[in-house]
Image (cartoon, rainbow, N blue to C red):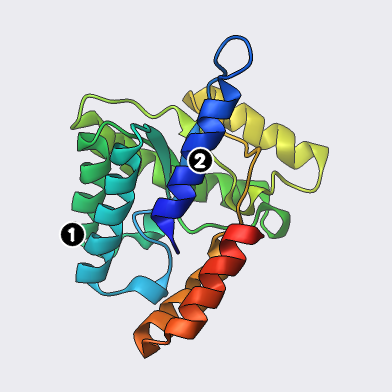
Amino acid sequence: MRLQAWMCGLSMLLLAAGSVGAPRPILVTVDDLPITGATHADAAERDRITTGLLTALAKHRIKAVGLVTWANLYDASDIRLLERWLEAGHELGNHSFRHLDYTRTDSTAYIADVDSCRRALTTLLSRHGQTLRFFRFPFLREGETPGKLAAMRSYLARTGQRNLPVTIDDQDWTFARPWVEARRRQDKAALDSLGNEYQTQ
């Protein structure tokens, strides 16, 4: 999408948040690192997208938390993409291994999946002198029963991870596939329409 326009809007939001009284911190997060889905399977395109994201964040002096879905790593080049986030001063968090839906998965299987990502991510972070602090539930679904929520809260506390909820969700993922398909067709009208819709939603 028009990432730079979105980042500009975010910067205005940050300024507005600090315009009345004491500044209020806003945490910017990016889900499904390094790059989500098979829509962007080409390594060069994944590198280009990562460069665009990091450039936009740097331009607006924003430090973000990127939530990693480990199954989105295809090969060693994707490890390098994650390392670029760390080298740029951002933080990485756990978004599970396979992005399972907790409402459709029992606690034992779900926690095992989340912990697989935790272990892999901890190894990566340790090489950069960092520790894992954050976890975000895939689909933002924390379980449909009190027992399942309690099981995850216990697991997170035991492993030193903190649930990172969302307060503003721009639903950008719903635009991703039609945007990529229009770009590959070089359909400027569709790109303009999607860009306008995204910015006015």
Query: Residue 10's mark?
Result: 2
99 vs 28, nearest the viewer: 28
Rendering quarter of residue 126? top left
Residue 64 in percent (x, y) is at 40, 35
46 vs 67, nearest the viewer: 46
Residue 80 in percent (x, y) is at 18, 51
Residue 160 in percent (x, y) is at 48, 23
What kind of residue is marked 1?
A: Ser
The secondary element bearing badge 2 is classed as helix
Q: Can the viewer see residue 30?
A: no
Residue ranking furthest to the right: 145
Above or below residue 159? Residue 47 is below
Q: Within 10 angstroms of label 1, few (less than 14), some, or many (20 or more) residues?
A: some
What kind of residue is marked 2?
A: Leu
Residue, x 43% and y 68% (percent of image)? 37
Q: Is residue 196 left or right of residue 88?
A: right
Report the quarter where the N terminus lies.
bottom left
Check whether the beta carbons of the residues at disc 2 and disc 1 lie within 8 A of each other. Answer: no
- Closer to the eye: label 2 or 1: 2
Report the quarter where the C terminus lies.
bottom right
Above or below residue 197? Residue 51 is above
Name the residue that disc number 1 marks.
77
Residue, x 28% and y 25% (percent of image)? 130
Real-space Cα distance between discs 2 and 1? 30 Å
Above or below residue 50? Residue 127 is above
Q: Is residue 57 left or right of residue 182?
A: left
Residue, x 66% and y 37% (percent of image)? 167
Residue 150 in percent (x, y) is at 72, 32
